[in-house]
Amino acid sequence: MTDNKNTDTKQSKATTPSSPDTHASHSKAAPNKPKPATRSRGGLILGAVAIAIALGSSGWLFYHGHQQATVLQNTLSAQQAQIARLEQALNDQQQTAAKVRAQVIDDTQTRLAQQDNTLKSLQKAVAEVKGRRPNDWLLAEADYLIRMAGRKIWLEHDAQSATALMEAADHRIAQLNDPSLMPIRQAMADDITALKAVKRIDRDGIVLRLTSMQQQVETLPLANAVIPDAIETEKPVVSESVNDWQTNLTTSVKDFVDNFVTYRKRDGNVVPLLSPTQSYYLQENVKNKLDQAMRAVYQGNDALYHEALGMAKDWTLRFYNQDATVTERFVEQIDALDQQRIGIDLPNKLKSQALVSDEIDTRLRRDIAPLTGGQS
């Protein structure tokens, strides 16, 4: 570019006619005319370089733009794929939510139906209660008391408590003031009379006495060994006659020999002393028999009661000292308890129980019948 400017300046100066020097220089420069061709070639090179640079820049811009377009296209494809996945997940969630909503609606409808049925049942129950007479509750309470009296009789053998329960049930029926229930009251009066006729036994008192005797067993003294008396034998006597010297000699020798070894014959059973272990087992066995007697008292088993006391008395007489005062009193207590009869004759059934149950069933059927017909 600088060379071109210089050339143009020089040309302008050569064409200016204002100065003689200009003519001179022009005349001198006339022989060098081939220089403009050289200058044109340099301009072409510079132009080609400029074009090449422009083309390179355009190619680089095109390549860079293509790369950015490719990246943008890949990013767009990835975003579209992600959007598709999100749309699919959203559709799945919507379907799941629809299923859950439908299930919730079904459950709610089922619960509402159940509550509706429960409400209807409650309404029917209220209507049934309103339709009954208030005094029917007294009859139901009397039936419960009679059933409890039966359990007291046959499970616990407690006639006294059963009598009190029957009297309470009779009082409930009396409050009804219903003449139609007179047969039931008559049956209850018979049951109460039968229960009062049962012999009363102080079971608690008997059991307390047996418990006290169990504690006395350890204080009973054991008997010593019992040895029967030996049979007395007559000893031969030496005579004073000289003629009996042979007999006297034999008698003296025999008496001398008998002094070394003494042999006595005894008739009868020898009761030996007990070891500590045997003594412990004896005490436990006597206590066990007294415990059996206590269980027999609550069960009303008269045979077992007397059998257990009899064995306890037998062991006491055989193995404990009969001369001791403690043993004598222990045996006396056993005899006193053995004289009591614990078996009682309880009624096999209560006449009033079936009558009250039948009356309640009759009233229930009568009250529920209209409701059943209206429901159908």
Image (spheres, helix red, strand yellow):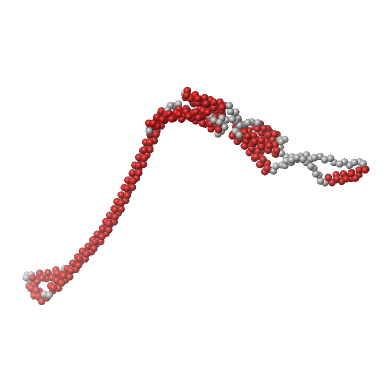
Comparing 44 with 77, the one in front is 77
Position of the N terminus by quadrant: bottom left
Q: Residue at x 68, y 34 (%)?
A: 331
Q: Is residue 264 above or below residue 371?
A: below
Comparing 108 with 205, the one in front is 108
In the picture provided, is 263 more to the left or to the right than 153? right
Instruction: Where is residue 263? Give x, y as percent.
Output: 80, 44
Please tell me how many numbered marks the rendered image carries. Answer: 0
Q: Residue at x 91, y 44 (%)?
A: 245
Comparing 43 with 168, the one in front is 168
Direction left: furthest residue: 17
The part of the image, by quadrant, that contains residue 250 is top right
Direction right: furthest residue: 242
Instruction: Where is residue 297? Give x, y as percent.
Output: 60, 33
Q: Does the rendering let one see residue 289?
A: yes
Instruction: Where is residue 98? Give x, y as percent.
Output: 32, 45
Q: Is residue 237 above or below residue 194?
A: below
Position of the C terminus by quadrant: top left
Instruction: Where is residue 51? Give x, y as percent.
Output: 18, 67
Q: Does the rendering let one see residue 333?
A: no
In the picture provided, is 253 more to the left or to the right than 118? right
